[in-house]
Image (spheres, rainbow, N blue to C red):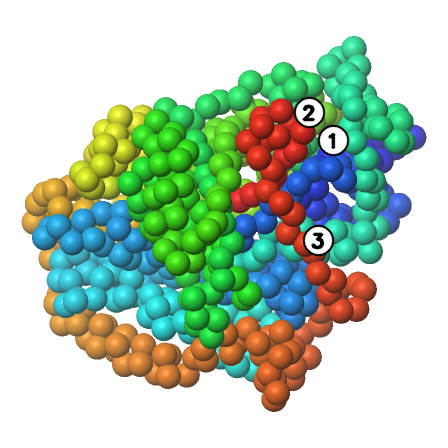
Amino acid sequence: MSNRLRKITIVGGGTAGWMTALILDMVFSRTSATKDRPQICLIESPNIATVGVGEATVPRMPVTIRQAGISERDFFRETNASFKLGVKFCNWNKDAKGNRIDYVNPFAHGQMLQGLDAAEYFLRFGNGDRDFTQSISPHDHLGRLCKGARQLGQPEFEQRFGYAYHLDAVKFAGMLTKVCTKRGVEHIQDEVQSVELDEQGNVSHLMLERKGRHDIEMVVDCTGFRGLIINQALGEPFMDYSDYLPNDRAMALQIEHPNPDKIESLTRSTALGAGWTWRVPLYNRVGTGYVFSSAHRTDDQAADEYLEWLGDSGKGATPRIIPMRVGRVRNAWVKNCVAIGLSGGFIEPLESTAIHMIDHAVRWFAEHLPTRDIEPPLRARYNRQMDKLYNEVLEFICLHYRLGNRTDDQYWIDARTEMKLPDRLAENLELWQHRLPLNHDTEFTTLFDHRVYQTVLLGKQVYDTGYGTGIRDRLRPLKKPIWFQGMKTAKADLARIIKSMPDHKTLLRDIRGELEQPAFGMAAAMKPTVALPGGAPAPVAVQNMPNLAEIQSGEKDLQLF
């Protein structure tokens, strides 16, 4: 008799649960005969609030949507998605004259010039009044001008420029529910009353409120911050990151577009007195929020600061406080349970990594899929991979705080001087005072390679404000004409690109099929896609955000970022 897994049970829905179901089914259907695939079952409480405030993603997302066979038109319609060309960081640093710095971390990298990174040339010669991102890519200009990510009439998922999506997290989960159930994922809406273990400490079965006993071979914990199985039942320790990152609270509001015809194709992160705000422009609204430190602001003080930042958009609104459990479980895979999403860990959403980490966690689990014996070497290697992934993200987020130079609030001083640094980042920051980041400085990169570090260092203008004094004297000799000829060509290219690109809103309407003479239809027909079930997309209501007591008691949970 085969010892293959016959069933994988996912506990918890939301983005984490349904993405897990989608990717597992997608991988199994591509690689395994039907009779050999484990059945996928998702158990979801009908009483858990899934809170969607607008979700920003990274460039892996279009790949996953395409691989799943979901048409881009259906995706944009269902989730009110928009394009994201990068993240704009506002007022995180001051320049040498004390003025605020705004820069974009784009989904793009500069071309090599004579075998050298463009960053070296920029650091040596600059580019007039253009910053580094504006010199190497069109993303900053396209975002500020509210331009789209590609021309009208291009095929689905066409990428001339690197892009990701902004999307409504609740509607995204609703879309995935329909896709997965049509593909054969069993969907059980029930409450888990208890988690039972066998003599070896594995999860043997769940007791459900209505259906009773549910036997377990392999279970994926997607129960959010509660960690119902990984923490509460299996007792896996939680590694708190509060020594590394200062923020432990968030608040959120959905607001209207100030100008519905102008949709910025960038996520914004704006520094305030005790943290930072996010601004995620969707097709139909804007998701906003404030991530802050309770050690530096009371909830009321933070709310006042946040509403003042929102201006007229926040008048009369009452944001609710969301506690953040920042850190990770020691091991994501324990016994026959894998924790994915918020149950496995959470690092503040500064770089929109939550869905990226879910995607990798599920794919790696599929690569290490055990038999019913749950082989320890597979579990150990998976945990090592997840450890590296969390370290990669933690190091990059810490970089933003350590290299800040604001002194107008104690929060920013403490974030720069009192927070611990991961060992590798501390070593690199010593090194990068003397040279720019190179590819072998980052040992594990799923998202943040050395070029992204270059962008942040140059975007923050750290080499002009006290960090790495004298680095230009240590740069190798470079030929100035090579750089300025490259910039002359880039300037001409930029003018052509801006002229040829449609407004973001126009592109979105075209993809959604709302233009009177759509250009998308013919191009979409060029690539096979699978339409979503159920005809016209059904609206998915955004539920009321649970209050602090409900979250702390476990009565309600959330999938926020």
- Which comes sooner in the sequence, label 2 or label 3? 3
Viewer-side residue, 147 vs 496? 147
Residue at (49%, 32%) from the top-left corner?
324
Quarter of the picture containing the N terminus is top right
Task: Identify which amino acid the numbered label 3 is placed on.
Answer: Gly
Q: 252 or 338, which is in the foreground?
A: 252
Left or right: residue 478 versus residue 233 is left
Q: Position of residue 152 (x, y in %)?
A: 53, 81
**Residue 433 position by quadrant:** top left
Residue found at the far right of this picture = 1
In this rendering, would 68 be left or right of 292? right
Asked if residue 244 is positioned above or below residue 525 in the image, the reply reads above
Mark 1 secondary-structure assignment: strand
Indicate the position of residue 263 as horizontal and vertical percent values. 45, 69
Residue 219: assigned label: 1
Mark 2 element type: helix
Answer with mark 1 or mark 2, whichever residue precedes in sequence.
1
Q: Nearer the viewer, mark 2 or mark 3?
A: 3
Q: How many marks?
A: 3
Camera-near label (3 vs 1) is 3
Residue 238 visible in the current orientation? yes
In terms of image quadrants, where is residue 65?
Answer: bottom right
Q: Amino acid at mark 1?
A: Val
Element type at marker 3? helix
- Residue 332 lies left or right of residue 85; in this view the side is right
The residue drawn where x is 53% and y is 21% is 238
Q: Pointer 2: what residue?
A: 229
The residue that appears at 56% across and 43% down in the rendered structure is 560
- Residue 174 has which mark? 3
Residue that lies at the very extreme toward the bottom in this rendered image:
517
Specify few, some or many for label 2: CA neighbours under 10 Å numbering under 14, 14-19, or 20 or more: many
**Residue 522 spot, x, y in % from top left:** 65, 84
